[in-house]
Amino acid sequence: GCTSLLPGFPIASEALDENFLAFDGDPNTHWASLDPDAAPGEAWVGIHFESGQQVQCVSIMPAPECYLCDLQIDLWNGSDWVTQGRFPSLHPGHWDMLHLWPALEPGMIWRIVNEASTINPWTIL
């Protein structure tokens, strides 16, 4: 399962001191985008690893008020973001395990992106 935390530093579509809260595993804290009306693909949060990491699964808890919880996972290839997996209809307020089969190629910079427009800031617990 998704049990190993990989070392890296958080990155996001907006430079916020709170970016790490998307990765602390605490459902009482959260990361939220600044834009309450983000178009699909505009709001994202990710991790920059010190070396290439092979991602096999991601545990994520969308905020309870998320009404369209469609996400994608992207890998930075050095010049552009490349989608590695899409995950429609996640469960707001509950942990979802996103399994990537086959395991993705090693990469240093990964992100989770909203695939739906938002009416509130996009939030990851």
Image (spheres, rainbow, N blue to C red):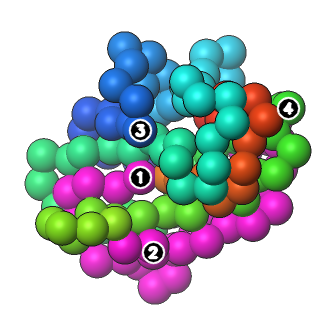
Residue 95 is one of the magenta-drawn residues: yes
Quarter-wise, where is residue 99 in the image? bottom right
Marks 1 and 2, the one that precedes in the sequence: 2
The residues bearing labels 3 and 4 have C-alpha atoms spaced at a distance of 20 Å
Tell me the residue that label 1 is attached to: 111
Q: Are the residues at dot 1 and dot 3 in contact (C-beta closer than 8 Å)?
A: no
The residues bearing labels 1 and 3 have C-alpha atoms spaced at a distance of 10 Å
The residues bearing labels 4 and 2 have C-alpha atoms spaced at a distance of 26 Å
Tell me the residue that label 4 is attached to: 65
Residue 13 badge = 3
**73 versus 64 height, above or below:** below
User: Which residue sits at x=44%, y=17%?
Assistant: 18
* Residue 2 visible in the displayed image: no
| Amino acid type, callout 2 | Gln
110 or 3, nearer to the observer = 110
Q: Secondary structure at mark 1?
A: strand
Quarter-wise, where is residue 6 in the image? top left
The residues bearing labels 4 and 1 have C-alpha atoms spaced at a distance of 21 Å
| Amino acid type, callout 1 | Arg
Residue 84 badge = 2
Marks 1 and 3, the one that precedes in the sequence: 3
Query: Could you tell me how many numbered marks the image carries?
Result: 4
